Image: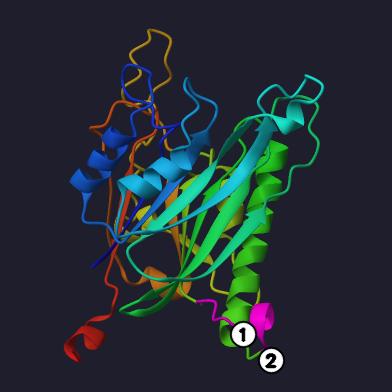
Amino acid sequence: MFKLITWNIQSGRSPDGKPDLGRVVACLDRLARHDVVCLQEVASGFDPGGEDQFAALRACMPGHAAVSAIACDLAADADRPGAADGPRRRIGSMILSRHPVLQVLRHSLPWPFDPAVPSMPRMALEVTLATPGGLLRVISAHLEYFSYQQRLAQVERLRELQREGRAHAVRARPGGDGPFAAVPRAAPALLAGDFNMLPGSPEHGRLLAPFGDDTPSWRDCWHVVQPGRRHAPTVGLHDLRPDAAPPFTFDYVFASADLAGRVRRMRVDASEQGSAHQAVLVELDWPPQQHQHQH
């Protein structure tokens, strides 16, 4: 089985509100012997002490290829003259893989101006992995929370990336030397992360919409393995405030339609109480059984 975990760690927050990456890694290890981990809201310079969590997670998870994408990169005192030469505050995503990473692509997501709400830049981090079952494309995304307009634009970009990735994977293109080398980009794909959208919302429906050509649509893994059942909540399970909203779902894993038939299990780890988000685990029959029998 191929196991992917996605989790918005909120800067490694522990129940006492302080960052604790050791607790994050322990939770990941407890949840599953994972192949790939997609983490959102990894930070550097934002929390007390300004720990570089990107570097710390690399050190905490030996045996993983670690790649990162910075969504927000600010001077520590952005309103102070000369601040650009000083320390910086960064927040973004990481993918950590036990399998070789052949290619990394960092996609800036649209950020159309929305004067009504606060917002921040967003990224999607894409890798092509060389797994025992073949090439696999994994994308970690974190969409805008406050602005529906921006979130919908970001969904459209994720759809464009699926069409683009599929075309690169199945249509021959000339290669060259150095950066022009024709590095493979996998056709089967997983899209995971914190999408800040509810199941059945317009943006959720749009992400799953057919493409109208040979591009495999995205399939919600929860619907694949538990059709007809309401999504398990991933946010607010441990919010004890009297005015807290009931728990809800913002975190998903989507599989391209050509891979969806191999999704076997999906569950939410409800135990961890640091981040407001819970880790989500998806298991796939990958490599396919016939490949396993050949070895």
Q: Is residue 16 above or below residue 177?
A: above
Q: Describe the colour scheme in one phrase.
A: rainbow
Q: Are marks 2 and 1 in contact (CB under 8 Å)?
A: yes
**Mark pair 2, 1: CA separation:** 7 Å
Residue 253 placed where, x, y %? 42, 54
Task: Say which element carries label 1.
Answer: loop
**Boundaries of the magenta span:** 174-186
The N terminus: image quadrant: bottom left
Q: Main secondary structure of the magenta part?
A: loop
Q: Residue at x 67, y 46 (%)?
A: 152
Does the segment drawn in magenta span residue 182? yes
Residue 290 placed where, x, y %? 23, 88
Does the segment drawn in magenta span residue 99? no
Residue 174 circle label: 2
Task: Say which element carries label 2.
Answer: loop
Q: Amino acid at mark 2?
A: Pro
Residue 149 circle label: none
Which of 229/100 is in front? 100
Disc 2 packing (10 Å; few <14; some 14–19; many ≥20): few
Q: Answer with left or right where residue 99 lies relative to residue 118.
A: left
Disc 1 packing (10 Å; few <14; some 14–19; many ≥20): some
The reply to whether residue 49 is in sight is yes
Q: Residue at x 40, y 27 (%)?
A: 276
Q: Mark 1 highlights which residue?
A: 182
Residue 177 placed where, x, y %? 67, 87
Which of 2/73 is in front? 73
